Image (cartoon, rainbow, N blue to C red):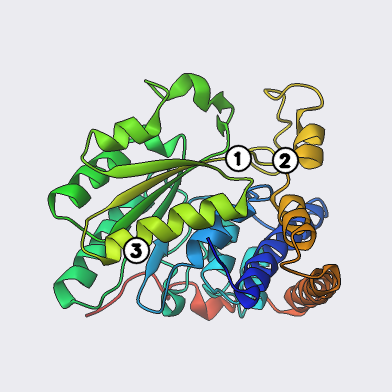
Amino acid sequence: MKIDKQRLLDGYRTMRVIREFEERVHKEFMTGQIPGFVHLYAGEEASAAAVCQQLGEYDTVASTHRGHGHSIAKGCDVMGMMKEIYGREGGLCGGKGGSMHIADLDVGMLGANGIVGGGAPLVCGAALTAKTLKTGGLSVAFFGDGAFNQGTTLESMNFARVYDLPVLFVLEDNGYAESTASSWSIGGHDPVRRAEGFGIKGARVDGHDYFAVYRAAEEAVAAIRNGEGPRFIHIEFTRYYGHFEGDAATYKKPGEVQDERRYLDALKFFRARTTGGGMLKAEDLDAIDAEVDTLIDAAVREAKAAPPPALSTLTTDVYLSY
């Protein structure tokens, strides 16, 4: 597999933005200035980055309650995202959606979703539209191991296969559905075989390995664009934080998170492989790190300075008239 230098740099930058965005939101949430619930994506960066690198202008994605990474990878404005999380004017949804409901249809982000398993039916609708209008677009459903046991997800997989829709189903298995281990809760213990039960070809990959995810996503998207119907990818990785901010994560073994950060870090793996293999220079990655730090600092600063939404907007964006 060959990936050119600029594409590698773009992939690293996306992962770094996601990581720093989440680490900063984690710190800022503890100040009490961020309203609502927050579910962080740190540790899962390679999935969103590598999958969304295969997508184009007419492609769409639907996310989960843990949606910051997907939003960033699909091109949502980081400044607008931070304002949205702070509930401020200028946020991508006017400061009225918050962390779990970030959306930007202009870039193909159908939205983060507080409903477990709520994204899969949405992408089927988007994919059916793309197929009917012959736009050439496809749609990606990101969902977790908990959502993989939801009827909405399984029905969507069946629907996508029956109508041969251009859909990529991406199971992001971070080991826990809230606090329930996926090793226990997924009957049969083989999600790829479950997908095959619907006639959907799938692959299982290590989500800490950007290159493994990239290869699987590239092959799946190529097959979908070739008219071969839906595809499925089971991505296994870990999340560094609890299910939500404030979760004590007592269901994890002592030292588990520390070991995950030390030994299971997609960014560390990427840096070691690309610099050690002569694909990239360490100084190029260092420059991206510095650029991203500046970006996140600015995003937080602007979000804190922005006013809350005006009361006059309270009843807007509720219903859409056609």
Closer to the eye: label 2 or 3:
3
**Residue to which mark 2 is pinned:** 264
- Let me know if residue 140 appears in the view: no
Q: What is the x, y in percent for residue 266?
A: 69, 50
In the image: residue 194, left or right of residue 53: left
SS label for mark 3: helix
Amino acid, disc 1? Phe
Q: What is the x, y in percent for residue 288?
A: 78, 73
Closer to the eye: label 3 or 1:
3
Q: Quadrant of residue 27?
A: bottom right
Q: Mark 1 or mark 2, which has the lower sequence index? A: 1
Q: Residues within 10 Å of mark 1 (few under 14, many from 20)?
A: many
Q: In which quarter of the image is residue 238?
A: top right
Residue located at (36% from left, 61% from top): 221
Amino acid, disc 3? Ala
| 102 shown above or below 75 | above
Q: Are marks 2 and 3 in contact (CB under 8 Å)?
A: no
| 95 shown above or below 43 | below
Q: What is the x, y in percent for residue 306?
A: 72, 79
Q: Residues within 10 Å of mark 3 (few under 14, many from 20)?
A: few
**Residue to which mark 3 is pinned:** 222
| 302 shown above or below 250 | below
Q: Do the residues labelled 1 and 2 touch (CB within 8 Å)?
A: yes
Nearer to the camera, 135 or 6 = 6
For the C terminus, the image quarter is bottom left
Q: Distance between the residues labelled 1 and 2?
A: 8 Å
Amino acid, disc 2? Leu
**Residue to which mark 1 is pinned:** 237
Nearer to the camera, 321 or 211 = 211
